[in-house]
Amino acid sequence: MSIPTLAALAGQPNSGKSTIFNMLTGARQHVANYPGVTVEKKTGHFSLYGSKVELVDLPGTYSLTSYSLEERVARDFVLREHPDVIINVADAANLKRNLYLTLQLLEMETPLVLALNMMDVAARRGMRVDVGGLSACLGLPVVPTIGKKRNGLDALKQSLAQTPSTSERYLVDYKTLQPFIFRLEARLTQEQALADMPLRWLAIKLLEGDGEADSLIQALGMAEILGFVSSLKLMFEQEHGLSPARHIAFSRHRAAADIAARFVAQPSEKKATLSDRADHYVCHKFFGPLILLAVLMLLYQVAIVFGNDLAARVWPLWGGAQNWLAGFLPDAEFMQDPLLRSLGLWVMKSLAAILNYLPIFFLLFSLIAILEDSGYMPRMAFILDRVFRRFGLHGQSTLPLILGGVYVGGCAIPAVMSTKAIPDEKARLATILITPMMNCLAKVPLYLLLISVYFTEHSGMAMFFVATVTLFMALPVAKALSLTLLRGKVSAPFIMEMPPYHLPTLRGVLSRAFERVLVFIKKIVTVVLAVAVIIFMLINFPGLDEQRLESYTAKADESMGNFMLAVEKTPLAGQLARDDLLALVLFEEALKDAKRGISDQAAAAAIDAGFEADNAMFFAVVRGSGDAGRALRAPLRQLVNTRKQLRRELREETFEHSLLGRLGKAIEPVTQYAGFNWKINIALLSAFAAKENSAATLGAIYGIDDADTALEAMQADALEFGPLHALALMLFMALYPPCVPASVMVRLQAGSSGWMLFSIFYQTCLGLGVAVLVFSGGSALGLSGWQAMWCFYALCVAATVVMGLMPARNPARAGQDLTSATAT
C-alpha cells in the first residue's frame, strides 16, 4: 500500500468535481489563487488510512490545450508539481465527452484514478456502464460514485491507497501520425533538459502547434527542434491533406466514442430527458430571452434590493461596533477632535462602508452558486453570446454587467470578481475593463441630487437616461479595446455545453458563498485600511494656521458663553458649569443615536430610563423636562447647532486648503472645459476612495441640505452651475474610474498592476472627454441640458450599432481543439 501525499482533482465543468472535492475534504478547505494568475486555487486535505493527503482542485477544463488560462494552470500543475495521483472526475451520463480529457491525462503519464460520477443520473436515463470492462480497457482504476450522496467514498479512497500503474494504460492510436510522433519523440529523448517530461505527450503537443509547448522548447534554447517539428507537420499535411492538429483532435474524439460505445449500454428507446424538455423553452429564441430577463430581474431583486434592505438592517450593528471602538479613542472636543480620534473614526467608517455590503455580496454569491450548480449559467451564456461576441465580450459577461449595475444599483467589486467564470481571456479582460462603467449603487446619490435640482420636471426620464446610457457607452468601448489593445490576446474556442439540470445542495451553495465572502474580506479590508489612512492625510494636511483656528475657537467660546448666561437664569445656576457643556452636548448626541430607528414606544422609554439613570440633570435639559429643562431647551438647541455649523465650516476650510484641495485647484484649467471648478474637482477626487464621497463632499462644500439650497448654492457659484454642468458631471461620474477597492479587484482578477492603472487612466480620460464634449459642445451649439442629454444618447446608440456591425478580428488559433464543437 502506497499512500499519496499530494493528489489533484481534474475534470470537465459540470462533472460534479466540486461535490467529489467536498466529499473527500469536508470543511478542511482553503481558497486562494495560483501564484501570478487570477485562477482560483482550492486546496484541502483528507485522512487516508491515518495519513494526511493534500488535495488540489484543478480548474475545470474540457481539454489540456493552452487556449484558456484555466487549461494552462491545470496542465502546468500536473507537469511541475508532479502529484502522486490524479483523480479524474467524469460524468457517467456523458462519458464520451468526458473521456476526451481522460485520454489527454493518460498521455501525461501521471498515476490516474477515474471517478465515474453521477451514476444515478446515468441510471435514470436507462444507461448501464461496464465499470470493470472500462477499467481493463483504460488500464486504470474506475470507481463509480454519486458525489452529492457520498456514495463511493470508501472505494475511491481504497483505489488512491494503491498507486495505479502507468505501464499498461490505454493510449490513443493516431494511425498515420504515429511514425511522425515516434520520430519526434526519439529526437526529444536526446535532450537531457527534457528528461522529466512525458516525451510522447510533448511530441503530440508540438505537432498540435501548442503555443505553450513551443515556448518551452524556445526557452530551453532548442530552436532547431521547432524547425524539425515544422518540417514534420508540413510533410504530414502534404501526404494526408490534413493538419496534424485536426488529425489529433479527430483521433481523440474517435477513440472516446469507440470506448463509450463498447462499455456504455444505451436504452433501446431514447426518451427526451427533463433537461431536453426544459431547454425547449429555456433556450428558445423567443422564450429564452424572456426567461433570462425574469431570472436576472429576480437576481437583482433578491441580491440588490432585498440585500440592500438587509444591509440597512445590519448597519446598526456596524454603528454599534464603531461606537464601542470609539470608546477606546481619545475623548471628543467641542471644536476640533484629537488627531488620533479623527483618524480612528475615519478608518472605522471607511471599513464599515465596505463591510456593510457583505449581506449583498453573500446573497449574490449564493445566487451565483445556484445558477452554476443548477446548470443555468451555460444557458445564459448561450442566449447572449451571439450579441456580446460582436463587441468582444462573452455570453458569461452578462452576470458581471448585471452585478455592476447594468441598470442601477450594483457594485463593481463583486462584478469584477465574477469575471473569473469567463473562459475566454480576451473577453474576460474586456469585461473587467468595462464593468466599472456600470451604475454601482454608490453613484446613485450624486445622480439623484443633480436630477432633483436641474431636471425636476423630467426626473423619471433623466434617471432612465443615466441608467441606460452607460451600457451604450460600454459596448463600443469593449469593441474598441478588443480591436486594439486586446487584439493580441488569444480567444479560447467557444465551448457550448448544455449540462443536465441539477438541484443545488444547500451545503454546496452556502459553502461556496462563505468561501467567496471570506476571500473578498481578506483581499479588500487590508487595502481599505491603507487607503483610508492615505486619504485622511490628503484631506487634513497641512491644516489651518493658528490665526484661523483661534477665530473658530473664539466663536465657540462665544456660543458657550451665551448658553451659560441662560443657565444663570435657571435653578441649575451653580450646578451646571461651563466645563460640563461638552459632556452635555455629547449626552444629547448619544441619546439621539441610541433612539435612531427605534419605533417601539416601550423600547424608547427603556432607553430614556437608562440615560436618565446615568445623569438626571443632563436628561432633564436634553428632554426639556422641569422648569430648568424647558428654559434651557432652546439655548441647548442653539448651542448644538452652532457647534455643528462651526465644525462643518472648519472641516470645509481645512478641506479647501488640504493637499487634495490644492490638487483640485491645480487641475481646474483642464476641467473647466467640462464645466468643473475646483470644488467639483475635490468632490470627484474624493470619490476615488469611495463613490459615496462625491455627493457628501459636494454637500459639505456647498452646504447642501436639500434641493432648494443646492440650487441656490450652486447657481451662486462663479461658474453659474446649471443643467449642462450637471449633465457633464453625471456622465463623468458614470464613466468614473473604479474606486480603490474595485481597482484592487481589477488588479487581482486581471493579474496585473498595469491593467489596473490602465483601467484608472483610460476611464478618467474617457470620462473627461465625454464631459468636455457634452459641456463645451452643448454650449457652442446653444443646447440646453435636456437637449444635450438626448443628442448624446442618440450618438451613443448609433455608435453601438456601428461598432456591433464591424467584423471582429480574432487572432489565428493554430491547432484549434475540436472540443469547441462539443454540445450535449
Image: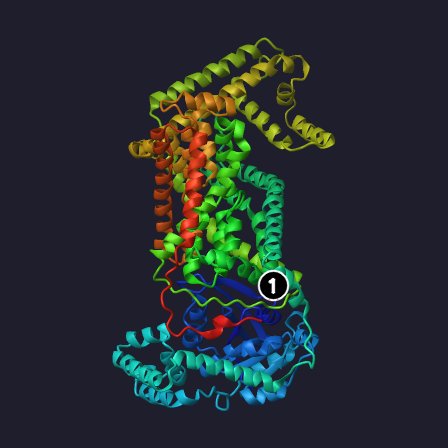
Quadrant of the image occupied by residue 694? top left
Task: Look at the numbered disc 1 and give the secondary structure of its residue.
Answer: helix
236 or 694, nearer to the observer: 236
Residue 748 pos. (x, y %): 43, 56
**Quadrant including the C terminus:** bottom right
Relative to 309, say whether 1 is above or below.
below
Residue visible at 47% across and 56% down in the picture: 388
Instruction: Determine which residue is flagged by label 1.
Output: 373
Q: Is residue 736 visible?
A: yes
Q: Residue furthest top?
A: 569
Amino acid beneath label 1: Asp
Relative to 786, say whether 70 is above or below.
below
Relative to 36, say whether 398 is above or below.
above
Residue 310 pos. (x, y %): 62, 44
Residue visible at 35% across and 47% down in the picture: 762
Report how many numbered discs are placed on residues in the image. 1
Quadrant of the image occupied by residue 778? top left
772 or 299, nearer to the observer: 772
Residue 488 pos. (x, y %): 34, 62
461 or 489, nearer to the observer: 461
Whether residue 32 sits left or right of residue 666 in the image: it is right
Residue visible at 46% across and 20% down in the picture: 712
Quadrant of the image occupied by residue 123? bottom right
Q: Is residue 339 visible?
A: no
Q: Residues within 10 Å of mark 1 (few under 14, many from 20)?
A: many
**Quadrant including the N terminus:** bottom right
Say how the picture is coloured. rainbow
Residue 292 pos. (x, y %): 59, 54
553 or 676, nearer to the observer: 676
